[in-house]
Amino acid sequence: MMEVLQNPRFRAIWYVVNVSELTRWMELLVTSVLVYTLTDSTLMLGLVLGFENLPRPIFSPFTGIIADRFDRKKIWIISMAIKLSAGVAIFVLLITGYIAPWHVFAAMLMQGVSRALEDPARRTAIFDIVGERRVVNALSIDSMSGTVGRMVGPFVGGFLIEHVGYFWPHYAGYTWAYAAIVVMHLAAVSMAIRVRIPRVEREWRVEPIWNSLGDVVRAAFNHRQLMGMLFITIMINGLAFPARQFVPAIGRDHLGVGETLVGVLAAAESIGQMVTAVILASVGSMRYHGRIFAAGAFSVMILSTIFVWSPWYVVTFGILVLSGIGLSCFGTMQGAITMRSSPPEMRGRMVGLQSLCIGIGTPPGVLLMGWLGDLIGIQMSVTLSALACIAISLPALFLTPLITRPSQPPPQTEVRPQTEGS
């Protein structure tokens, strides 16, 4: 871990990601509580996360191509400028008192476009900086940034909503929270402009974009371990992870706590994530990335069926901490398997494909979970979805070599003559 952190270029990226992730998780909590307060509907609450993830399946395959072909620093800065623009728009609407749920959905859609653009560019830039030997360590540290943001951001957002309601007639707590969000977005953009990302010269063919997408899909289908990982990724993001979006409903309606403690509960998983990420970042080398990935994924699925039923705040908090351990194993190994299994010339596109699999399940999954929550209660809705996730995902452990073989790089292929293009 220290070897990676001694790299000044990696540290520069890491500092920006810390600020950006803190802002993201604070913003997600603030917008979720705002929409639930305005509508009192779990379906509307779920749509906040649904709109944030909707751009992923649409844009991620193309943003992976962009990351392979163009300057990754410029892509990263553009994505962060989109986040800043969306934050400013919501801040202005809160000041004027004209905020409505559809405004929040539009802003979260812009945030989703930004994330679809950012992830392949940032993660492949990290790989270029640290190399294959230290990619697990670097991705674990990168994951720690999201973990710290998730640990602190929801608490700060909930505290500002509940306790800083001064000097403004409209949505005072939310206004102050969004003022802080805008300032942090601006700081992240300013820091990112100063980051130096090595420019790696790549050769690529001038070809129709669908051919380029077809290449990466065929490469994924030819790597059965990668296919097993991507399948479970779709299932867990559609049927298990959306449960976290309904923490405001669980906290307010079933545990009877205010916004500050809702924010603490939303941050609970990050504690388990942090401890596990530090351990994974510190290990020397590992062979069976798929086993760690699968253990993390299924622990999250199982714990999702439990935490919604706890009548005690402290117990619910503890269950979510344990879930965070699995979440860290899942997320870190997901990135490691993807990049280790990718030919160098399509690494950005493979990360884009991974991002597509993350996003493709979330919008319909969170929509279904929220709709069922309005009909039969959010506790029963979350439980049924998580049990379905377990049942559908389990065969992937036996039909693919995800847990039976060490992680393998892709087979060497003959390099075809290529010409430069734009």
Image (cartoon, rainbow, N blue to C red):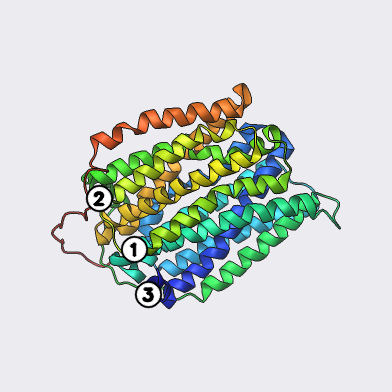
Q: What residue type is labelled 1?
A: Val
Dot 3 falls on a residue whose secondary structure is: loop
Visible residue check, residue 83 = no
Residue holding disc 1: 135
Mark 3 or mark 2, which has the lower sequence index?
3
Dot 2 falls on a residue whose secondary structure is: helix
Q: Position of residue 93 (x, y in %)?
A: 74, 51
- Which is more foreground, mark 1 or mark 2? 1
Q: Looking at the picture, tell me which residue is in the foreground, 109 or 340.
A: 340
Dot 1 falls on a residue whose secondary structure is: helix
Q: Position of residue 289 (x, y in %)?
A: 30, 51
Which corner quadrant of the image does residue 80 belong to? bottom right
**Which residue is outermost to the left?**
414
Q: Where is residue 405 in the image (x, y as percent from the top left)?
A: 21, 46
Q: Position of residue 189 (x, y in %)?
A: 57, 68
In screen coordinates, is 155 left or right of 369?
right
Distance between the Cα atoms at labels 3 and 1? 16 Å
Q: Which amino acid does label 3 sit on?
A: Pro
Residue holding disc 2: 215
Which quadrant would the C terminus be assigned to in this image?
A: bottom left
Residue holding disc 3: 198
Mark 3 or mark 1, which has the lower sequence index?
1
Residue depicted at 37% across the width and 73% down the height:
3
Residue 102 is marked as: none
